[in-house]
Amino acid sequence: MTRARIATTAAYAVQGFGFAVVLTSIPGYKERLGMGDDVVTLVVLGVCVFAGLGSALSGVVAALRGARAVVVGGLLLAALAVAGVGLAPSWPVFFVAIGLYGLALGAVDAAMNMLGIDVERAHGRSLLASFFAANAAGGVLGALAVSGSALVGLGQPVALPLVALLVAAGAVWLALRLPDGGTTVPGVVAAGGTPGTERPTEADPVAVGVGGDGRGAAPLGTVTWVAAGTIALLGAGMLAFPVADSAVSSWSATFLRDVLAASAAAAPLGYAAYQAALIVSRLVGDGLVERLGRVRVVRVGGTLGALGFVAVAAAPGWPVAVLGLAATGLGLGVVAPLAFSAIGDRAREAVATGTGTGSAEPSAGIVATVTDRAVARLNVFTYAGAVLGGVLTGVFATAHHLRLGFVVLAVLAAVSAVLAGAFRPARVALVSVSEATPPA
């Protein structure tokens, strides 16, 4: 289990590293290819759209090949795309490369969460917040790498292919160490598959059951969906985070500089405070879940995020806004990982309900298949929120009402608090079919 947890943590970090490199290299793209701000906006929007598509496709591919294959293949595709972005001599080549990166980004994000849920189940306690912390830490390293390459005079045609080699090397390392999705049982994370927990498919004639004779079983095709309403409810509950993350990264420095008269040195401090608090919240989030429960942590986090945005909107000076942004990161940082934990629990319940077993213990393999598809759909909200956050605050910035824009973000954060009940733990346990006790 320790090996699986370390490898999964590394996958989150590698993904965060590559994403930060692509994101923080935007000024270099503008200079090298002569892009205007309007073109950059379209590029970011395109990445989000393709990432949403990649996320949706990942559920299908994971069902056939496993989540590990999606993570490794997606990272290799991302490495190829990053190298293409750095070497692109013209806009058309750049747009193809950045589109491929978007597909890889969405696929890897979704598949990482599939594996993260598997490992969390194996440990029997909350772990996803720490995985998201590794993702954020990888992002910090990626930003530092871009900064360092600029300091030593490495141009993008050299620096980005080098980053691509690092990401590809990480993918190869992960291919040998990541657990395979759908092979997790309590106390066991097997890289090659554990008997009794193999991932079935809809075409598999084997029925789903918890007894040795399959009593109460149903065809897999009848239980492969978590209700769309359930996914939408959790998506709405977690939407505040990607919206806030996009808005803060895009507009916090502008707000501090143009509205609150911060100096050029002070303007970036808002985003720095937000990002640092985000990492802290994820490092302590799993422990808080163990003590307070997932629902209470989400409710407190959403409330703190809302209060932080209110402080930003009403700030008389930039120091208050920086504190407000820190509070926002501290509160909302745990919402997204806990949403994915919750969708894993809804998958358990969907299988138990679909097999007519109620609160009995569903098959680990079937649950993993249902979980992967639900995670892929829930992950689409991440990119929808990113687009919404950039567009929303951009509209308010154009109208010179950025304060009002942060009030809207406060309302979205409050929605997370209101919908915290949807994040409740599962009411079923998880065992493999092979471990289920046959009837006397």
Image (cartoon, rainbow, N blue to C red):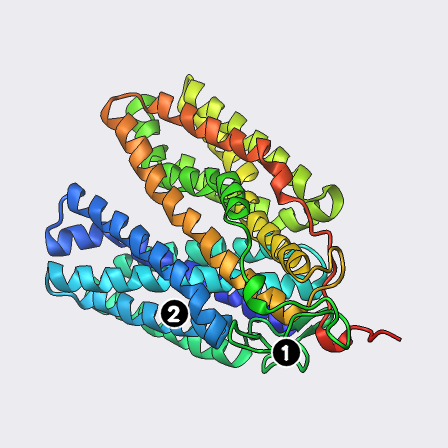
Q: Callout 1, which amino acid?
A: Ala
Location of residue 400 by image quarter = top left
- Inspect this view and state whether residue 155 appears: no
Taking the spot 27% from the left edge, 54% from the top edge, the residue there is 25
Q: Residue at x 22, y 64 (%)?
A: 97
Packing grade of label 1 (10 A; few <14, some 14-19, many >=20) is many
User: Which residue in the structure is indicated by mark 2?
Assistant: 74
Instruction: Pinpoint residue 275: horizontal percent, then vertical percent.
Output: 46, 44
Secondary structure of residue under mark 1: loop
Disc 1: which residue: 190
- Compared with 85, 179 (above or below) is below
Residue at coordinates 58% horizontally, 68% vertically from top-left? Answer: 220
Q: Amino acid at mark 2?
A: Gly
The image shows residue 241, relative to residue 87, as above or below, that is above
252 or 189, which lies in front?
189
Relative to residue 328, is residue 428 drawn left or right?
Answer: right
- The percent position of residue 61, horizontal first and vertical second, equals 43, 71
Quick one: SS at disc 2?
A: helix
Residue contact at pointers 2 and 1, CB within 8 angstroms: no
